[in-house]
């Protein structure tokens, strides 16, 4: 008769014994030792961390005085973003000439790196646009803070006393609440 600690299995399958050896511990229990081993593993594949630089960093020696250079979206999935480029040009951005920045090779007269083109415009215009963006962000934050505090923003009347509101030439919207009739 078979031993009671063995389990019966189908024909051709080996017997299972309950005294199976557990696998030895693959990782050390001490978290500091695990961290040290993982650090060595990462540094072995990564190399010296200091050797990696931001590929989009522009050497300031190439930027002419009074100008700002920035990487701007040029293409997505190799499709040129014409409407975005035209919007950039309307705000003063122009492509940097390839001879001004020989660090990155140019294609068809445009310096492109991973779908971003190097563009320039006068620093005064950039500062003015950044200030405008900052004002708009501050205004949005103030409006949202007033809404969250239960106050209405300074540009809005606190109450219209249920009178019709005119917006874009359309009248009839009201701030007061009244139930809507339910059709039969």
Image: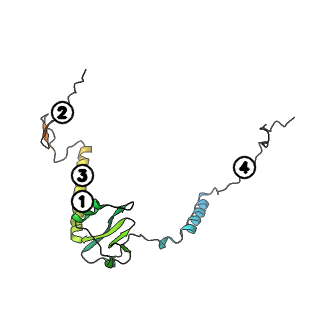
Q: Earlier in the sequence, mark 4 or mark 1?
A: 4
**Residue 170: horizontal and vertical position, in percent?**
13, 39
Mark 1: few/some/many CA within 10 Å (<14, 14-19, 20+):
few
Cα distance, mark 2 to mark 4? 72 Å
Q: In the depicted view, which residue is nearer to us: 18 or 98?
A: 98
Q: Is residue 104 left or right of residue 49?
A: left
Q: Residues within 10 Å of mark 3 (few under 14, many from 20)?
A: few
Checking the image for residue 176, the label placed there is 2
- Disc 4 from disc 1: Cα separation: 63 Å
Which mark, residue 133?
1
Residue 184 x %, y %: 25, 20
Q: Earlier in the sequence, mark 4 or mark 3?
A: 4
Left or right, 141 with respect to 52, comes to left
Q: Earlier in the sequence, mark 1 or mark 2?
A: 1
C-alpha gap between disc 1 and disc 2: 35 Å
The image quadrant of residue 84 is bottom left
Where in the figure is residue 115, as x and y percent of width and height?
Answer: 37, 64
Identify the residue position indicated by label 3 in the image: 140
Task: Give the residue displayed 25% in from the left and 48% down from the top.
Answer: 144
- CA distance for labels 2 and 3: 25 Å
Residue on which the image places disc 4: 22
Q: Are marks 1 and 2 in contact (CB under 8 Å)?
A: no
Q: Position of residue 94 (x, y in %)?
A: 26, 70
- Indicate the quadrant where residue 150 lies: top left
- Closer to the N terminus: mark 2 or mark 4? 4
Figure quadrant of the N terminus: top right
């Amino acid at each position: 008769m078979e031993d009671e600690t063995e389990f019966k299995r189908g024909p051709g399958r080996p017997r299972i014994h309950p005294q199976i050896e557990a696998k030895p511990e693959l990782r050390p229990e001490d978290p500091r030792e695990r961290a040290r081993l993982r650090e060595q593993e990462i540094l072995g594949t990564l190399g010296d961390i200091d050797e990696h630089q931001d590929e989009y960093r522009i050497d300031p020696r190439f930027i002419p005085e009074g100008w700002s250079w920035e990487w701007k979206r040029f293409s997505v999935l190799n499709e040129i973003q014409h409407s975005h480029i035209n919007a950039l040009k309307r705000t003063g951005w122009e492509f940097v000439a390839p001879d001004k920045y020989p660090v990155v090779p140019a294609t068809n007269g445009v310096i492109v790196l991973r779908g971003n083109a190097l563009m320039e415009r006068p620093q005064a215009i950039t500062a003015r646009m950044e200030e405008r963006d900052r004002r708009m962000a501050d205004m949005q934050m103030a409006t949202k803070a007033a809404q969250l505090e239960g106050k209405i923003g300074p540009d809005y009347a606190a109450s219209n006393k249920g009178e019709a509101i005119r917006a874009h030439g359309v009248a009839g919207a009201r701030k007061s609440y009244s139930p809507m009739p339910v059709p039969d």
